[in-house]
Image (spheres, helix red, strand yellow):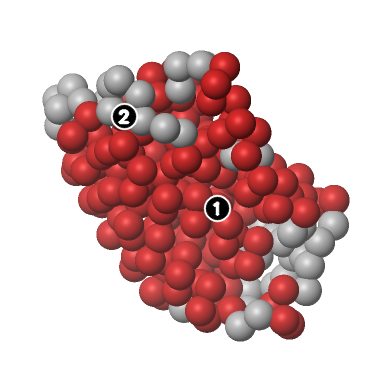
Amino acid sequence: MAVCSLFVTGAVCVYGIFTSLRPKTPLFYKIVVYGFCSYFLAASYSFLYAELLPEGTGFHAGYFGYEGTFFFLFSSYFGALDRLADGREPEYRIYRIAALLPPVLIVLCGGDLWSRLFLLPVACAAYYACKHLILPDIDMGIIRVMRPYNGVILLFCLVQPFTADFVSGGYSDRFPDIPFTVINLVLVALALPTARRGVQKWFI
């Protein structure tokens, strides 16, 4: 699966770079591209680590690449999209509260304090993905056109506790690795095309 991960993330990285070179590409999309380029670098490091040190276990620098992906996703929401999509209407407060459920579940899935700390950026990205998924559409229509992307990102965040190597909770003993890894790679492959389609309808 490491080779498949390297191929899929590499293809996503190339796709993102070429599609982000278009003039007037929104900053939101560029930040998302940077996030998945970070994921590719992490997958590359993990692949080389496994090949060169097959007996090696524990923390390695590739984890920072995976973490970077979710910092970029969080930044894309917080800095570029949320101010356009969420008008802070008081009547929609219930949706913002409901969006806290996925991040809480993600953090609780961490087996120890170290794992939960690493899952915090995942949880932050999940909050915005969920909020933008369930918020009623507003005048500009951004919520509606970005819903497929937000659904993909929310699922991507939710599967991390079952696929991320840095999560120690014994999940590998209770859940088969391959199905969750395949689901994770499918979501990675879908993320940028759905983001670009939404951006084209909303901005270009």
**Which residue is more in the foreground, 45 or 36?**
36
The quadrant in which the C terminus is found is: top left
Mark nearer the N terminus (1 vs 2)? 2
In space, the residues marked 1 and 2 are separated at their CA atoms by: 21 Å
**Which residue is more in the foreground, 94 or 124?**
94
On the picture, is 149 further left or further right than 184? left
Residue 95, numbered circle: none
Considering only vertical position in the picture, is 59 above or below 173? above
Q: Position of residue 139 (x, y in %)?
A: 30, 20
Which residue is tagged 2?
142
Q: Which residue is situated farthest in the right direction here?
A: 113
- Secondary element under disc 2, as helix, strand or loop, is helix
State if disc 2 and disc 1 touch (CB < 8 Å): no
Q: Residue 161's quadrant in the figure?
A: bottom right
Q: Amino acid at mark 1?
A: Cys
Which residue is tagged 1?
157
Considering only vertical position in the picture, is 176 above or below 29? below
- Secondary element under disc 1, as helix, strand or loop, is helix
Q: Which residue is situated farthest in the front direction here?
A: 91
Q: Position of residue 38 (x, y in %)?
A: 46, 46
Residue shown at the point (48%, 61%) measured from the top left: 43
Q: Position of residue 131 (x, y in %)?
A: 52, 36
Q: Amino acid at mark 2?
A: Ile
On the picture, is 194 further left or further right than 64? left
Query: What is the crowding at mark 2: few (fewer than 14 residues within 10 Å), some, or many (at least 20)?
Result: many
Q: Position of residue 191 (x, y in %)?
A: 35, 51
Labels 1, 2: front one: 2
Residue shown at the point (72%, 46%) measured from the top left: 104
Q: Is residue 34 visible?
A: no
On the picture, is 95 further left or further right than 201? right
On the picture, is 21 further left or further right than 114? left
Residue shown at the point (46%, 34%) measured from the top left: 135
